[in-house]
Image (cartoon, rainbow, N blue to C red):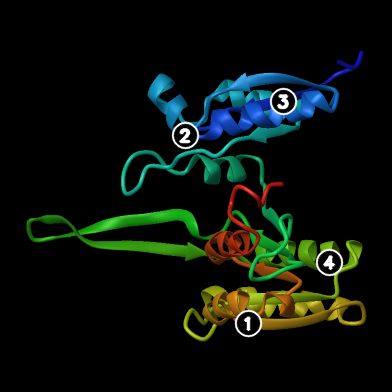
Amino acid sequence: MAATTIPVTLIEGDGIGPEILEATVRVLEALNAPYSWNRFRAGMSAFEQTGDPLPRAMLEDIRRTRLALKAPLTTPVGKGFRSANVRLREEFHLYANVRPAVTLIHGGKFDNIDLVMIRENTEGLYVGVEHYVPIDDDPRAVAEASGIITRSGCRRIAQFAFDYAVTHGRKKVTIIHKANILKMLTGLFLETAQQVGKDYESKITIDERIVDNTAMQLVMNPSQFDVLLTTNMFGDILSDEIAGLIGGLGLAPG
């Protein structure tokens, strides 16, 4: 270990999280990476132990180290606590989720995959503003959710995506939306991203696609895409699809 070490908040995660995190730590230590680990539990394992999926001590440690390595965290389906991943993003204003996908094992249906998904990480339907409306004797007769998208949030992620594309020598950014149906919610995202994109038109090609068409085109001809820019929920779904092009979610972080 190097004489001067860099402290890292290590979040063990749930399910296979501890296993893959240990493998990651072993790789880094074999490379003599100068890290010291401050270990914490989060997600379901922390909730079962302390009643809080995001322990305060862990959050304070992240603020101190400013560097965290996190394994996957479980979110209960349909009940229980709110997503710990979403809360982490909100807590630290982590508005840009950058998901590259590059072919690591050649010989599959598609070779030479080299895509980057840039997903807005704090707005949209994932803000979790939802409730039930009781009718007669059914307390859950209607479920209602609100998606929240702000122009400032759209501008921020669009500028990040276009700057990323230019800095990394990318040629094209595709804005992905559902503005034909969600005319206001994702219409604002499309409109704002296109406005921001006008300052970059001399450097990169900018186009737009409806999300369902994008999903189909990705599995037919992924080479037509380069950098994909989209909202929170669409990015969550499409980033998994893109990971599938290179072999699965286990390969994407590699």
Looking at the image, can residue 115 be seen?
Answer: yes
Residue type at numbered disc 1: Arg
Foreground: 177 or 99? 99
Splitting the image into 4 quarters, where does residue 115 fall?
bottom right
| Chain-order first, disc 1 or disc 3 | 3
Residue type at numbered disc 4: Ala
Q: Secondary structure at mark 2?
A: loop
Residue at which label 1 appears:
209
- Viewer-nearest of discs 3 and 2: 3
Side of 7 where 75 appears, left or right = left
Residue type at numbered disc 3: Arg
Q: Quadrant of the N terminus?
A: top right
- Report if the CB atoms under discs 1 and 4 are less than 8 Å apart: no
Q: Secondary structure at mark 1?
A: strand
Kindly report the distance in space between the C-alpha atoms of the residues bearing marks 1 and 3. 42 Å
Residue at which label 3 appears:
26
